[in-house]
């Protein structure tokens, strides 16, 4: 929802300062929906004022896709065109999963500045502060996905699943990313500084995204590593996304993504809110 | 439920606390604080950095949980009724509690919506506040481009979107120039006129003197003195007697006379001609000065001032408020 913020001249002129100070009658507290929308609107305004933050969803995906396609294409699959068919779904998963960690960094910044304290003293449904921000993050993830798929199509990516398959694949990624983000909100509250949060995020995200089936077929890996790769949530997601994009996806693959996503939310959303309330 | 609330509030107290304790590691940041704050008053916490002022406020504002003791805000128990308390209070933290990337009006609209206003009402309320706080010119500027004083004002404006019954102001004027400081003081006075109770912390002795009906002097997590500004000043005597001698050769003798007459230690300054001492009673001061005259000690100047709160602090803690080491921030 978009809100026009206008300079309201009539209100400016008629108000006596003291009246304004005392004039704040208390309305009923906002509904969960209303406060979530207010927080989502804040996130949109932040994009408007700090457009640099969109680099991670625009420039990164482009660099990643070009880099990995031309760096590994020849070596791994024999040709870049061939490799792109395999790589694009995976690298889309990897890129979006990595972007999720910025959610935690934003929250961490809110905490270190004073605004977190203000939100916590408001009579609102507290999770809306995070849900509102995550909803706008979903828009960011969609943008990143659109850019990568668009570039992929230009480079020669041909999804056999057609438009429907691609859209389905993106929806699965969005579901997963929204759920996965709750890990970063929890971490964002625990970590004392942006630096330490970045470090922890990289420690989690890099092994998780690289030691997966994103770049290579797991059957080429030593068996002990295959075990990890197969239960890695990133692999589960990449498998489903690949299936959908190439028109050979199964409900089972999608079902596993839903299960993994649900596990993330069930564990990390309440944990985040517990930490949010208890943060000192 | 309604009648019960009225009954509980009949004592007319905004805050009542007994033995509040907060421990961080081995340090007792707040160490047994008792408070009784009547409604509609301004209550000042005065103390150096790290004295426990912010921690106490954060406990009372439901942001952190006490490790001991109990408190009620308008009769609502701090531990079990935090939701009821949240709907009565507002907090302006030490650091601007607003989104600095957003503009002034965007911040106020956001807070208004989170208070429950519709988007339209929120915009009206935001415009009203910006105007009242002299910020309409800056309405569409990002808050990070505001001056310190403007930032403070937008922050307080955000705290009174819905006029709170109890407003916590954590060091509202720290780092502000005198003009901005006066503006903040005017806002606080206007708020109190409307019936809001204000609990403010400050390191600035003049500020507590100017604004607060009652003052609690806090040091190392404990309230070491409490009362009105006059009571606190009276507790350390009439004030400070300053005497300037014409000839520095007279200083030892003059110091001895004053010490004998006033019965308190006399501070001698390095310039050799200035003497100062705490005076309990102005008639003794007159006698002491007469004695100096009898001994033919020439005085170039003397003054007897009411004690400043700085002197109160010095007397109570043995160290000046400004001498204390700066400590960690509580966040």
Image (cartoon, helix red, strand yellow):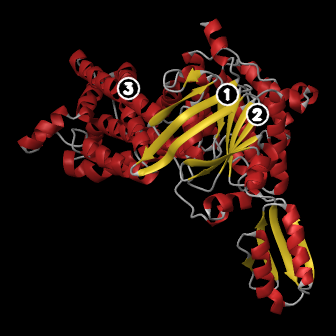
Left or right, A242 with reference to B218: left
Task: Give the CA distance from mark 1 to mark 2.
Answer: 9 Å
Which chain does tag 3 point to? A
Residue A230 is labelled as none
Q: Which of marks 1 and 2 is nearer the N terminus?
A: 1
Residue that carries the numbered disc 2 in the rendered image: B41
Task: Give the CA distance from mark 3 to mark 2.
Answer: 40 Å
Q: Are marks 3 and 2 on the same chain?
A: no
For numbered disc 1, what is the local secondary structure? strand
Question: Of circles 1 and 3, which is in front?
Answer: 1
Q: Do labels 1 and 3 share a chain?
A: no
Q: Crowdedness of circle 2 by 10 Å Cα count: few (<14), some, many (20+)?
A: many
Cβ–Cβ below 8 Å for labels 1 and 2? yes
Q: Quadrant of the N terminus of chain A?
A: top right
Pick out the residue farthest to the left: A223
Residue A270 is labelled as 3
Which chain does tag 2 point to? B
Which chain does tag 1 point to? B
Q: How many marks?
A: 3
Residue shown at 20%/45% (left/top)?
A77
Residue shown at 61%/28% (left/top)?
A41
Q: Crowdedness of circle 1 by 10 Å Cα count: few (<14), some, many (20+)?
A: many
For numbered disc 2, what is the local secondary structure? loop
Is residue A151 something that shows in the picture?
Answer: no
For numbered disc 3, what is the local secondary structure? helix
Residue that carries the numbered disc 1 in the rendered image: B14
* Figure quadrant of residue A95: top left
User: In the rendering, at what x and y percent does residue A101 appear?
Assistant: 41, 41
Task: Name above or below for residue A153 compared with residue B185.
Answer: above
């Amino acid at each position: 929802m978009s809100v026009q913020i206008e300079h309201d001249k009539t209100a400016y002129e008629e108000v006596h300062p003291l009246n304004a100070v005392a004039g704040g009658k208390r309305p009923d507290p906002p509904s969960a929906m209303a406060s979530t929308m207010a927080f989502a609107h804040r996130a949109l305004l932040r994009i408007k004022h700090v457009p640099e933050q969109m680099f991670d969803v625009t420039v990164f995906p482009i660099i990643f896709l070009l880099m990995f396609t031309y760096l590994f294409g020849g070596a791994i699959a024999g040709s870049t065109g061939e490799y792109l068919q395999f790589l694009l779904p995976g690298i889309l998963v990897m890129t979006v999963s990595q972007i999720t960690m910025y959610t935690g960094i934003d929250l961490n910044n809110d905490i270190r500045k004073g605004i977190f304290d203000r939100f916590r003293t408001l009579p609102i449904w507290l999770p809306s502060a995070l849900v509102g921000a995550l909803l706008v993050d979903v828009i960011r993830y969609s943008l990143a996905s659109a850019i990568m798929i668009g570039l992929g199509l230009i480079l020669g990516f041909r999804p056999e699943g057609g438009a429907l398959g691609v859209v389905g694949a993106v929806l699965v990624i969005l579901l997963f990313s929204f759920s996965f983000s709750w890990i970063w909100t929890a971490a964002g509250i625990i970590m004392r500084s942006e630096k330490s949060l970045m470090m922890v995020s990289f420690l989690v995200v890099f092994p998780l995204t690289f030691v997966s089936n994103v770049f290579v077929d797991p059957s080429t890996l030593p068996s002990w590593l295959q075990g990890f790769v197969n239960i890695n949530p990133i692999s589960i997601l990449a498998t489903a996304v690949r299936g959908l994009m190439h028109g050979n996806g199964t409900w089972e693959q999608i079902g596993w993504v839903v299960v993994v996503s649900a596990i993330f939310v069930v564990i990390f959303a309440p944990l985040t809110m517990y930490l949010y309330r208890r943060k000192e | 439920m309604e009648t019960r609330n009225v009954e509980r509030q009949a004592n007319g107290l905004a805050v009542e606390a007994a033995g509040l304790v907060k421990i961080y590691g081995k340090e007792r940041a707040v160490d047994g604080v008792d408070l009784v704050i009547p409604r509609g008053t301004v209550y000042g916490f005065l103390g150096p950095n790290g004295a426990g002022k912010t921690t106490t406020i954060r406990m009372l504002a439901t942001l952190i949980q006490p490790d001991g003791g109990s408190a009620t805000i308008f009769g609502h128990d701090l531990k079990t009724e935090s939701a009821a308390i949240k709907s009565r209070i507002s907090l302006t933290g030490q650091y601007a509690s607003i989104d600095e990337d957003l503009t002034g009006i965007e911040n106020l609209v956001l807070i208004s919506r989170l208070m429950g206003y519709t988007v339209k009402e929120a915009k009206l309320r935001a415009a009203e506040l910006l105007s009242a706080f002299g910020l309409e010119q800056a309405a569409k500027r990002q808050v990070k481009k505001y001056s310190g004083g403007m930032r403070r004002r937008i922050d307080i404006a955000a705290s009174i979107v819905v006029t709170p019954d109890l407003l916590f102001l954590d060091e509202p004027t720290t780092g502000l120039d005198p003009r901005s400081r006066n503006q903040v003081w005017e806002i606080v006075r206007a708020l109190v006129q409307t019936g809001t109770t204000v609990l403010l912390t400050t390191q600035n002795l003049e500020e507590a003197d100017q604004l607060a009906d009652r003052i609690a002097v806090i040091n190392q997590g404990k309230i070491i003195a409490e009362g009105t500004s006059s009571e606190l000043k009276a507790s350390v005597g009439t004030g400070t007697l300053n005497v300037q001698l014409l000839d520095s050769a007279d200083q030892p003798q003059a110091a001895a006379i004053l010490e004998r007459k006033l019965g308190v230690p006399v501070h001698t300054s390095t310039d050799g001609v200035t003497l100062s001492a705490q005076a309990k009673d102005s008639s003794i001061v007159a006698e002491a000065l007469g004695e100096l005259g009898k001994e033919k000690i020439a005085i170039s100047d003397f003054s007897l001032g009411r004690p400043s709160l700085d002197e109160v602090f010095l007397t109570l803690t043995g160290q000046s408020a400004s001498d204390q080491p700066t400590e960690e921030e509580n966040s």
